[in-house]
């Protein structure tokens, strides 16, 4: 049937509406490529069978995709009079339940993700129905809240294979109106008024492009739709064509009318078979109704559409090579000018627009250019579809007004990573785009803002990356892509990218030198400035942006041969080893335990980690979060294992032997003298290694004993004093000298130390408590957590009352709370954020709860109330709720009006520690924020005018944890030794121990073994150590649970890994 | 096509014919712009990127072989930035294949060698790729040595545009691109080849040479090309 008059079009619309809103239930199964891949066909068949078996009369339809990939497969279910339900993650097994519900006249509302009561197709509005209050409306769920559907207006709701459904929602009414009521110039004016910019990425104003084509001389003109979507991670064009092919046809018809072109071509990449099939079908249907061909809709307008499948070259997305490909020549770009608008396909003037640009045309003509430009920002009006993929919870197609903030897209809509890992960066625009770091997530997403950051809008791909993504590896991946897709015509792109890729491969394999980075940067800049076409001009963007925002990572690869995100295989032993700040060879000692070689295991552990018994008890164990066994069941109990190894070695009967073994590895005396200020974990670690390397080491300590926070802030029940004494005793036995009750500045100045020693290491720690800054903080009964913990540690009486409130959520807050419990108090912890945001070790929080500590989350301290005699009576906290996301995906607490009063007589402030500013400010050091000492992060060298002053530990990186402090102390020791002796020597200390290199073929050892815990009633009244170590039997089995990530495929490589130094010393 | 425009080039005013490229105008006024893929008589392709110049008001560098002059245009043909880019591009070309002048038939008659001398490229800091590439000696008269090829496409263009045979074209992509005869067959088997030898004469390096020449003996004769094109223009 040919449509010529309005009545005919209306009649088709009525017919279509009977399919979308029939007088019986309608089920629409999302069958884009994504839905098909997720088992959509089985669901469709399952629904068909079950509905038939149960005798349910329903209309079952294929629909496109709604774009919420993470919830696929999606099924729409509509029953007359009710809102439409969107059922998510439907499986074939669910189809019976759905059919049964319908058979009983019920709706499976519990299975529904959301409902749609009313939908604005922009060319028409559909009212589905109201009610079902228990199901959220579609735009109330986070993924869709804030989205604006213009391009995707029909996707996932209508049957893409049925032209009647497209007409039912107002399709082809716009072209009818255009043909009957508007002149071509009026159409172009409307598009210009909308200020629509090309959605392929370059952002050229579409209206101007059309005008150029209209004005170009010549009878024959072509318009082309560029659907050669080749960016890794971008698939919006595919979904648009698969879900709503007719909107593309109508958009191109409007253009054809406006510019006087009678032939349009759609160039679709051959990798999109479903899009090709549906668009072909749509073109046939449109031809059948007289919408394509001649005398369209009863006018003299003539227009037809051709579909051409691409041959798989990425560069064919570039317009001149696309035209070459259409002309049966090989897809290579040619220089412009002449532009396609002057000389394009077959020499005739040609206009090429991206798929998504075409999808904006119908809404602009239907609703007006002004309506369109009302969305977005003035330079970039309208919406843009982004494909949100990578390390993000809610993957999918997101259509946002341009000018939205990146963080809104990634956190509000994407939901962040959905894991405990933080988002690190987002790559926009695929291989031509750039990596934008999380610190810049406040930036607006529009053409100019993204270009200013060094990225591009591109087709709209957004690949989210988290801490596990190595940015050098990301750059290497994209350059490898561009390198293989380069056409090879121009020298910079062809040869320049080859050299860039060569250098990146050197970096990721740890063979690059620093000057290679300079070469890489200048090559990248040169390629960008001199290449012939857009591919070469944008290909270096991933390199340039990662070098700009993540140079530190490049330097780690080059100088330390370390890939901390654990991606570049040659640059780590195993994920656990790589994550450990002191780089313990974890798989190595686990294997030694497995082989029953405990003595050698103990030596290996000690040479990597000088305080293994303490860390075996209190370490934050970042290693376990990266353990791959965790992907199978639970991570290996790494911390408990090295505690076990060392506890065995430190038994009285073995102690002298281990001391002897360690001392046996000592280098001969160098005659160099090193002073270390501070006997905390950082200072002790440095002292241990420097002494072993043959230097004469003196440690100065302000307090009466060594150990720092380990001794004075960690309670006895977590770390018994006797354990610490044994470790420090070993360091003393090696010949490290200790001077106690000595203060820097009071007893000796830094200058004096410099005179008497060849090098000075400042490991001063963070011993000042951050003040709360609320009224009443000076009342009697308010104390800091350090005051409380130190008093208990030095066996003084701690002045805590009956009811204690601890303010804070870190480890010292929990330590204070559990200490107070042991002193007989009733304890409450007030923390301003939620439980999942607590920095404290999760096991500690759980143990505290078991001991009766009460937790108040989202409680922001407001004021401390006191009695007339100056004592504390209560803490007032404001209740908070979770507010907007910060740049790293943590929700900031927002204080509400609601206030709660917690009665108490003691308040322990554990809001965090900071550097003692008065102490460091007198030292002529370069200081960073919070008075932290600024150092070269690789060598720990300070900016002190005199040479040989280093700093390590909390005083450098702020209050962290024991093992981080030790890591920086160890790093400083390596640097000091190298500077004193001229070459790196630290790695020589490692004993060479051989063990089996075999990967278990199946995961062995069963579930994780835990060290026992003393029962709550027994432990809560005194300070006896709570955690009992693993039994030898359990330890042996636990060791077999290791999956041996350190064993590399080639024997040569695994040999190298075994010998890899603990901290790979920086090479200057 | 016979109007005149005045433009500024390297801070001096020069006149140029309408429709002329920046490169042509520069050459008539004795201003040197290095080129490699360009050859008078063939349509420019802008592949080598050596002739890039700065034009005021245009935010990227433009190839002078393809960009037409216009009234009031301000062109800079020589600057720190351009010199740096040209040296890098030249280094890239040298590093790409095996250019060993001392044993090359074109030693002393090579456009690439001459460019290096003119631009002062004394050594290449980028490592050489040293690819293993074949030499096609199947043809009776000519030799095709991929090791010396710079992919300027002069052979491709002269065969297509002047001889009309289109024997040569690119095959492969990116760094693996090569100039091949017909559907990648040995030259002697390329049925489209007329054996005219134009490709050999326009080749800037020793990639295409006449058989029977030894080191430094392959001097190319290119006079035919402007003559041919001029005659064709006249008799069209």
Image (spheres, coloured by chain):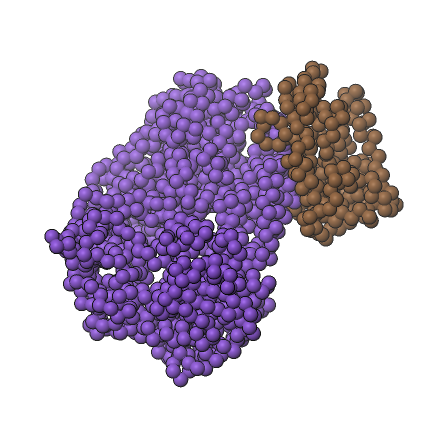
Chain colours: A purple, B brown
Image check: A408 left or right of A909?
right
Check the image and name the residue furthest to the left.
Answer: A868
Image check: A981 left or right of A637?
right
Q: Is residue B66 above or below residue A387?
A: above
Q: Position of residue A777 (x, y in %)?
A: 22, 52
Quarter of the image that includes the N terminus of chain A: top left
Q: Is residue A368 above or below residue B122?
A: above
Image check: A835 left or right of A944?
left
Residue B112 visible (yes or no): no
Q: Is residue B13 above or below residue A155?
A: above
Instruction: Tell which of A1038 and A438 is nearer to you.
Output: A438
Instruction: Tell which of A927 and A1050 is nearer to you.
Output: A927
Image check: A475 left or right of A28?
right
Instruction: Tell which of A22 and B159 is nearer to you.
Output: B159
Residue at horizontal 56 percent and vertical 42 percent from the top: A539
Quarter of the image that includes the C terminus of chain A: bottom right
The answer to which quarter of the image holds residue A884 is top left
Q: Position of residue A697 (x, y in %)?
A: 48, 69
């Amino acid at each position: 049937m040919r449509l010529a008059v309005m009545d005919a079009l209306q009649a088709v619309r009525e017919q279509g509406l009977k399919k979308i809103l029939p007088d019986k239930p309608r089920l629409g199964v999302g069958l884009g490529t994504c839905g098909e891949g997720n088992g959509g066909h089985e669901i469709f068949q399952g629904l068909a069978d079950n509905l038939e078996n149960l005798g349910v009369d329903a209309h079952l339809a294929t629909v496109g995709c709604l774009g919420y990939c993470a919830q696929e497969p999606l099924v729409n279910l509509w029953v007359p009079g009710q809102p439409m339900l969107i059922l998510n993650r439907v499986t074939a097994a669910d189809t019976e339940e759905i059919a049964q519900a319908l058979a009983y006249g019920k709706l499976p509302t519990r299975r529904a993700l959301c409902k749609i009561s009313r939908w604005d197709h922009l060319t028409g509005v559909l009212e589905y129905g109201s009610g079902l209050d228990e199901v959220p409306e579609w735009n109330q769920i986070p993924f869709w809240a804030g989205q604006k559907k213009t391009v995707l207006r029909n996707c996932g709701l209508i049957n893409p294979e049925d032209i009647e459904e497209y007409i039912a929602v107002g399709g082809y009414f716009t072209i009818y109106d255009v043909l009957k009521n508007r002149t071509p110039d009026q159409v172009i004016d409307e598009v210009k008024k909308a200020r629509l910019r090309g959605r392929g990425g370059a952002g050229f104003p579409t209206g101007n492009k059309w005008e150029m084509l209209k004005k170009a001389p010549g009878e024959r003109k072509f318009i082309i739709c560029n659907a050669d979507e080749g960016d890794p991670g971008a698939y919006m064009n595919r979904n648009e064509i698969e879900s709503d092919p007719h909107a593309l046809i109508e958009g191109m018809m409007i253009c054809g009318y406006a510019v006087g072109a009678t032939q349009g071509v759609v160039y679709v990449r051959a990798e999109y078979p479903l899009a090709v099939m549906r668009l072909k079908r749509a073109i046939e249907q449109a031809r059948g109704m007289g919408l394509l061909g001649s005398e369209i809709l009863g006018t003299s307008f003539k227009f037809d559409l051709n579909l051409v499948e691409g041959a798989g070259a990425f560069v064919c997305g570039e317009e001149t090579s696309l035209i070459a490909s259409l002309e049966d020549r090989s897809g290579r770009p040619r220089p412009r000018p002449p532009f396609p608008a002057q000389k394009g396909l077959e020499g005739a003037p040609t206009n090429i627009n991206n798929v998504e640009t075409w999808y904006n045309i119908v809404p602009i003509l239907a609703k007006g250019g002004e309506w369109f430009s009302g969305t977005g920002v003035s330079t970039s009006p309208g919406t843009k579809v982004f494909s949100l993929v990578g390390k993000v919870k809610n993957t999918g197609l997101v259509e946002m007004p341009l000018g939205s903030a990146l963080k809104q897209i990634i956190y509000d809509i994407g939901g962040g990573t959905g894991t405990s890992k933080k988002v690190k960066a987002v790559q926009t625009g695929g291989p031509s785009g750039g990596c934008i770091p999380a610190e810049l997530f406040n930036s607006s997403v529009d053409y100019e803002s993204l270009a200013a950051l060094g990225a591009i809008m591109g087709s709209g791909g957004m690949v989210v990356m988290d801490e596990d993504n190595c940015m050098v590896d990301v750059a290497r991946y994209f350059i490898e892509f561009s390198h293989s897709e380069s056409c090879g015509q121009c020298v910079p792109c062809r040869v320049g990218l080859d050299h860039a890729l060569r250098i990146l491969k050197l970096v990721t394999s740890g063979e690059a030198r620093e000057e290679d980075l300079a070469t890489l940067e200048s090559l990248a800049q040169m390629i960008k400035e001199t290449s012939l076409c857009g591919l070469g001009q944008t290909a270096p963007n991933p390199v340039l942006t990662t070098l700009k925002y993540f140079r530190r990572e490049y330097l780690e690869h080059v100088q330390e041969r370390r890939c901390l995100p654990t991606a570049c295989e040659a640059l780590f032993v195993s994920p656990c080893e790589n994550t450990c700040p002191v780089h313990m060879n974890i798989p190595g000692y686990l294997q030694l335990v497995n082989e029953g070689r405990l003595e050698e295991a103990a030596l290996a552990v000690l040479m990597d980690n000088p305080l293994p018994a303490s860390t075996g008890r209190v370490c934050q164990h970042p290693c376990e979060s990266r353990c791959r066994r965790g992907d199978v069941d639970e991570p290996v109990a790494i911390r408990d294992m090295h505690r076990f190894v060392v506890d065995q070695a430190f038994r009285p009967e073995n102690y002298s032997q281990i001391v002897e073994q360690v001392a046996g590895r000592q280098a001969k005396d160098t005659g160099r003298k090193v002073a270390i200020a501070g006997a905390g974990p950082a200072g002790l670690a440095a002292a241990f290694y420097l002494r072993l390397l043959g230097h004469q080491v003196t440690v100065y300590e302000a307090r009466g004993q060594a150990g720092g926070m380990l001794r004075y802030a960690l309670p006895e029940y977590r770390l018994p004093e006797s354990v610490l004494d044994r470790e420090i005793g070993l360091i003393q036995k090696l010949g490290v000298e200790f001077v106690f009750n000595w203060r820097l500045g009071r007893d000796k100045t830094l200058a004096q130390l410099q005179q008497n020693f060849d090098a000075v290491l400042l490991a001063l720690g963070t011993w000042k408590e951050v003040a709360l800054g609320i009224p009443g903080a000076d009342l009697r009964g308010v104390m800091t957590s350090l005051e409380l913990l130190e008093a208990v540690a030095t066996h003084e009486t701690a002045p805590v009352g009956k009811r204690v409130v601890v303010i804070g959520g870190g480890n010292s807050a929990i330590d204070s709370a559990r200490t107070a419990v042991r002193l007989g108090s009733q304890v409450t912890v007030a923390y301003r954020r939620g439980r999942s945001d607590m920095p404290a070790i999760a096991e500690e929080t759980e143990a505290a709860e078991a001991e009766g500590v009460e937790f108040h989350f989202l409680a922001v301290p407001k004021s401390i109330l006191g009695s007339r005699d100056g004592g504390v009576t209560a803490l007032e906290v404001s209740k908070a709720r979770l507010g907007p996301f910060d740049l790293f995906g943590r929700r900031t607490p927002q204080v509400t009006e609601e206030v709660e009063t917690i009665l108490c007589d003691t308040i322990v402030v554990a809001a965090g520690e900071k550097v003692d500013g008065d102490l460091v400010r007198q030292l002529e050091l370069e200081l960073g924020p919070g008075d932290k000492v600024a150092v070269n992060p690789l060598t720990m060298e300070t900016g002190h005018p005199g040479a040989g002053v280093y700093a390590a530990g909390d005083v450098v990186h702020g209050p962290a944890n024991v093992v981080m402090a030790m890591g920086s102390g160890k790093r400083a020791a390596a640097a000091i030794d190298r500077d004193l002796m001229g070459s790196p020597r630290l790695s020589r200390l490692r004993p060479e121990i051989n063990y089996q290199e075999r990967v278990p073929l199946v995961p062995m050892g069963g579930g994780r073994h835990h060290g026992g815990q003393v029962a709550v009633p027994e432990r809560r009244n005194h300070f006896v150590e709570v955690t009992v170590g693993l039994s030898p039997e359990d330890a042996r089995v636990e060791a077999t649970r290791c999956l041996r990530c350190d064993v590399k495929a080639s024997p040569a490589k695994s040999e190298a890994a075994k010998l890899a130094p603990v901290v790979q010393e920086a090479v200057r | 096509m016979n109007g005149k425009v005045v433009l500024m080039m390297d801070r001096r005013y020069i006149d140029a014919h309408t429709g002329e490229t920046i490169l042509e105008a520069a050459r008539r006024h004795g201003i040197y712009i290095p080129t490699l893929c360009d050859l008078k008589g063939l349509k420019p392709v802008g592949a080598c990127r050596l002739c890039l110049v700065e034009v005021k008001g245009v935010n990227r560098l433009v190839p002078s072989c393809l960009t037409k002059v216009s009234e009031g245009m301000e062109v800079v043909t020589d600057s720190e930035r351009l010199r740096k880019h040209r040296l890098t591009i030249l280094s890239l070309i040298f590093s790409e294949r095996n250019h060993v002048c001392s044993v090359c038939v074109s030693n002393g008659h090579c456009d690439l060698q001459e460019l290096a001398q003119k631009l002062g490229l004394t050594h290449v800091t980028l490592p050489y790729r040293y690819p293993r590439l074949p030499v096609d000696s199947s043809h009776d008269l000519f030799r095709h040595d991929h090791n010396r090829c710079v992919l300027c496409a002069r052979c491709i263009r002269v065969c297509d545009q002047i001889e009309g045979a289109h024997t040569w074209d690119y095959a492969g992509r990116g760094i693996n691109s090569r100039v091949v005869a017909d559907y990648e067959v040995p030259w002697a088997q390329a049925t489209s080849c007329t054996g005219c030898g134009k490709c050999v004469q326009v080749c800037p390096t020793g990639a295409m040479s006449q058989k029977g020449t030894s080191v430094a003996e392959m001097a190319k004769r290119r006079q035919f090309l402007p003559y041919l094109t001029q005659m064709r223009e006249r008799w069209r």
